[in-house]
Image (cartoon, helix red, strand yellow):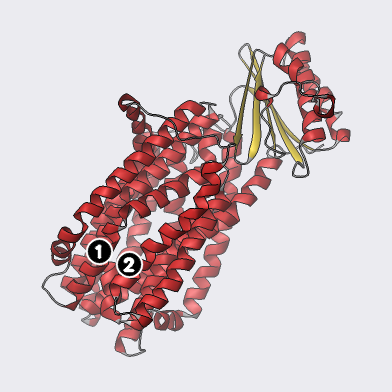
Amino acid sequence: MEKTNNRLLNAKLNKYIIPGIMMSLALQLGNIVDTIFVSNLIGVEAMSAITMSLPVETIVQLTGYCLGVGGSIAVGNMLGKRDKESASKLFTATFAVTLLVGLLFTICAVPAAGPIARLLVSGDGVLTTYTGDYIRVSMLGAPVIGIGLMMVSYLGVENHPELASVYLIAANVINLVLDYIFLRFTPLGVTGASLSTVLGFLIAMVVFVRYIRSDKRNIQFVRMKVSDFGIIKEAIVTGVPMLIFMAANFIKALGLNTIIMNQIGEEGMAVFTVCDNVLLIVEMLTGGIIGVIPNVAGILFGEKDYVGIRVLCKKMLKYSYIVLAVIFVAIMLFTEQITILFGSDGGELGVHMVSALRLFAVCVIPYLWNKFIVSYYESIEETAIASFVTFLENAVAVLPATYVGIYIWKQIDGIGINGIAVGFVATEIITVIAAWIFRKIKHKNSTFYIVPDKNPGTNLDFSIKSTMEEAQNVNKKIMEFCKANGASAKKSNLAAVCAEEMTVNIIKFGGKTSNWIDINLCLEDDTCRLRIRDNGVNFNPLEYSYDSEDFDIHGIELVKKISTSMDYIRAIDMNNTIISF
């Protein structure tokens, strides 16, 4: 018998990592591809226009991102508490609001794009024209981008991380192909780069058909009354860190563009664009791993599985820093080749890019830690800490740090470009220290995790392989634990019988995918609570009734009769059954 609990959970996390990386890669790849194609096929000025458009891009994505991330975490908590009805209402409400806001952007796109571009870029030069062209198409496609980003977040909590990956990969493959066609063979210019992104998100939505038509979803589209839309506050509250992140990103993008253009000029914008895209590459590969945390931790937190939360966090951090080490070495070894990829001609500007990028690479180490703590704290409803870190990192610290960095470096070499990189390194280090201080003030005697070291009550945690030989020991192990901890003979017998019946049925009918079973027995006050997780076929014991001799699952009706309550949810692609006595 496997004595280490959460063996199955560990295995499931491995399943989420690769789709998570692919999803993050696909999500960021569009911006990077646009930048590479534009810089090489149009020019550095056009590449800078994409960076100048970032404040508007952030606003366009705001609703889909915030309601998607906040809604999916809130839905994960609801599913952890077995409240499917509220989860479906929240999903429907966030979908409707995201679509409506996107349509408002579409209506405003044509008249507003030009004036916005002139606000972002002083004057009426080529850079202003490029910026306006890029913004216009992004605003027209706001409903498509918003719904796409929102659905990606929900697919993760709905046991379909691979489907979210397929959608984003398809969207970016289409974007890649259309980028080349539009920029090489049509006169669309920068407009073509923006249009290819929107069309990629739109055409790839065919992937969602499989999910929407599935009758095994935990959340559904439901009819809503006007009064029902009040539930959207759950997504807003949970999504506050993401909302602050997006708002801070807007301030950050607008502020950095202004500082760099005023202090250095278009050469500084070109260098900053390259550094920012390298950070997106880091985000692609490590963000997907960290991104598993909101999908899984919300459900574990709802179930009060604090041990599982620790298992999750330690594994994600370990994998993230392994990947980051590889990225850091690659940046240092191939710095010049990276700058050439983004349109550097190897001249004086190229020399500045190489120097700045090597300094900038240092910031990715604390950057990853800051990203992790935001994802973790928002998942356990510690939104104050997550929001503090987000706002400090992306608005409060980065602008003055960059300004001071440029000013100091100007005194050194008369140019100041390396000061951009120094400002980012300082920002991430300041944020790490400030986050630690903030947590210590808010939770004086807590550890980093804040949640208890152990799950509530007195717990027996163990995992078994899905074999009849190991199932035979379940009854004995539970009886010994109950006796040692003073549980009544009646509750001990009920727990042992139920655990044995459930595990035997999982082994017999779970299918080929069933290989491990995680078992937790909790004694808390006068309640005895048994939780069983398995990765077998989707099976809800609450909906089972005797059908025929060919499919007679013995013991389910017995468990229903002798238990006080029985709850079930399919979450993290596992059957999660909780039985109380």
Which residue corresponds to mark 2?
194
- When asked about the image quadrant of residue 519, the answer is top right
What whole-number distance in Å separates the C-alpha atoms at marks 1 and 2? Answer: 8 Å
Numbered disc 2: secondary structure: helix
What residue lies at 44% left-to-right and 31% top-to-bottom? 222
Residue 243, given in percent of the width and then of the height, sits at 32, 45
Dot 1 or dot 2, earlier in sequence: 1
Q: Is residue 182 left or right of residue 10?
A: left
Question: 475 above or below 51?
Answer: above
Q: Which residue reaches farthest right? A: 469
Question: 523 above or below 397?
Answer: above
Q: Amino acid at mark 1?
A: Ile
- When asked about the image quadrant of residue 453, the answer is top right
- How packed mark 2 is, by other alpha carbons closer than 10 Å (few <14, some 14-19, many 20 or more), is many
Q: How many marks?
A: 2
Which residue corresponds to mark 1?
135
Residue 489 can be seen, yes or no: yes
